[in-house]
Image (tube, grey):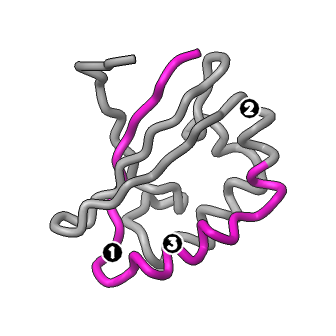
Amino acid sequence: MKRVAFKMKLKPGCIDEYKKRHDAIWPELKQLLANAGIQDYSIFFDEDSHTLFAVQNVVGDAGSQDLGKTEIVQKWWAYMADIMETNPDNSPISIPLKEVFYLK
């Protein structure tokens, strides 16, 4: 199992809507993530910079950011595009982060 971390940017004033949408995550998206080996997926928010920090444990080689060719992920991206900074294909602008310390 590997840990993957990345950051994304939320538009100002959108944290409540972001949380609301994630609290009601679509069952088919949740199942896709589980089937892809993504476990213990957390997203944190820095209020000062509007930065979202995500970390997930992944069994296998792919992470959630590698599922963009699936129809359900593309629908989710379109659903979230109005509250996040995105690429032209609606995928969130996501910057991978390098792990520099881990205490187990």
Q: Horizontally, is 61 left or right of 12 in the view?
A: right
* Image location of residue 49, percent across then percent down: 18, 64
Image quadrant assignment for residue 13 = bottom left
The region drawn magenta spans 1-30
Label 1 environment density (alpha carbons within 10 Å; few <14, some 14–19, many ≥20): some
Asked if the magenta segment contains residue 15, the reply would be yes
Q: Which of marks 3 and 1 is nearer the N terminus?
A: 1
Asked if the magenta segment contains residue 101, the reply would be no
Please tell me whether mark 3 sits on a helix, a strand or a loop.
helix
Instruction: Please state, as top left, top right, bottom left or bottom right, where the N terminus lies in the image.
Output: top right
On the image, numbered disc 2 is attached to which residue? 36
Looking at the picture, which amino acid does disc 1 mark? Lys
Q: Do the residues labelled 3 and 1 touch (CB within 8 Å)?
A: no
Residue sitting at 62 percent across and 73 percent down? 79
On the image, numbered disc 1 is attached to which residue? 11
Looking at the picture, which amino acid does disc 3 mark? Lys
Residue sitting at 16 percent across and 67 percent down? 48
Check the image and report above or below for 88 versus 99: below
* Image location of residue 96, percent across then percent down: 36, 34
* Image location of residue 70, percent across then percent down: 75, 46
Please tell me whether mark 2 sits on a helix, a strand or a loop.
loop
On the image, numbered disc 3 is attached to which residue? 19
